[in-house]
């Protein structure tokens, strides 16, 4: 599975719902896509960058989500099967990884919107 970091960054920065749901967030959000890892860096709600996160330890991040490539394929399917509609249910039912920090739950709507944007990008949906 290949997702374009820069295409995601552009889409996320332009998305009203995502920017609304990330307001006040400062710090790093780590996404583990099987063998590929991204770090989204936020400053007071503004997405500053999306970078390779392979060398970033979980402890340096406010939120960490991840899974195997096959799990992301199911999560990002245009019409996901039950319990792959969002990261939280995929973590509970299918052992995807989601941190249990306060920020994870405070920004769960942002994670859900991020998943929608990734799904659109993955399926090339406008």
Image (cartoon, helix red, strand yellow):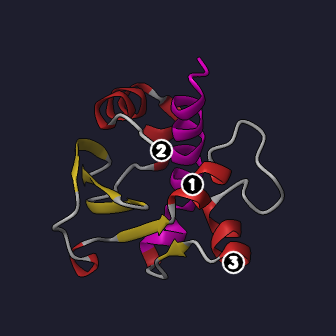
Which of the two marks, 3 or 1, is nearer to us in this view? 1
Tell me, yes or no, whether the highlighted magenta stretch contains residue 120.
yes
Above or below 14: residue 5? below
The foreground one among 28 and 119 is: 119
Above or below 84: residue 60? below
Cα separation, mark 3 vs mark 1, equals 14 Å
Does the image show residue 94? yes
Q: Is residue 87 left or right of residue 89?
A: left
Tell me, yes or no, whether the highlighted magenta stretch contains residue 75.
no
Pointer 1 residue: 72
Residue at 33 percent across and 61 percent down: it is 29
Which of the two marks, 1 or 2, is nearer to us in this view? 2
Residue at 42 percent across and 40 percent down: it is 2
Magenta stretch prevailing secondary structure: helix
Image coordinates for residue 54, horizontal then vertical, percent: 22, 63
Pointer 3 residue: 92
The foreground one among 76 and 105 is: 76
Residue extending furthest toward the left: 55
Label 1 or label 2, whichever comes before in sequence order: 2
Residue extending furthest toward the top: 126
Q: Are marks 1 and 2 in contact (CB under 8 Å)?
A: yes
Q: Residues within 10 Å of mark 2 (few under 14, many from 20)?
A: few
Residue at 39 percent across and 34 percent down: it is 8
Pointer 2 residue: 1
Q: Secondary structure at mark 2?
A: loop
Image quadrant in which you'd find residue 28: bottom left
Image coordinates for residue 102, horizontal then vertical, percent: 45, 78
Q: Is residue 17 left or right of residue 95?
A: left
Q: Magenta part of the protein: which range?
A: 103-126
Image coordinates for residue 9, horizontal then vertical, percent: 33, 34
The disc placed on residue 52 is none
């Amino acid at each position: 599975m290949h997702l374009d970091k820069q295409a995601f960054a552009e889409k996320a920065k332009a998305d009203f719902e995502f920017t609304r749901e990330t307001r006040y967030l400062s710090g790093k959000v780590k996404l583990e896509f099987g063998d590929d890892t991204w770090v989204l860096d936020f400053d007071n709600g503004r997405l500053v960058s999306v970078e390779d996160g392979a060398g970033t330890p979980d402890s340096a991040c406010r939120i960490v989500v991840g899974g195997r490539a096959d799990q992301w394929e199911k999560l990002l399917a245009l019409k996901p099967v039950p319990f792959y509609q969002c990261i939280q249910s995929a973590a509970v039912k299918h052992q995807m990884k989601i941190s249990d920090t306060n920020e994870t739950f405070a920004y769960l709507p942002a994670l859900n919107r991020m998943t929608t944007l990734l799904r659109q990008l993955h399926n090339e949906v406008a």
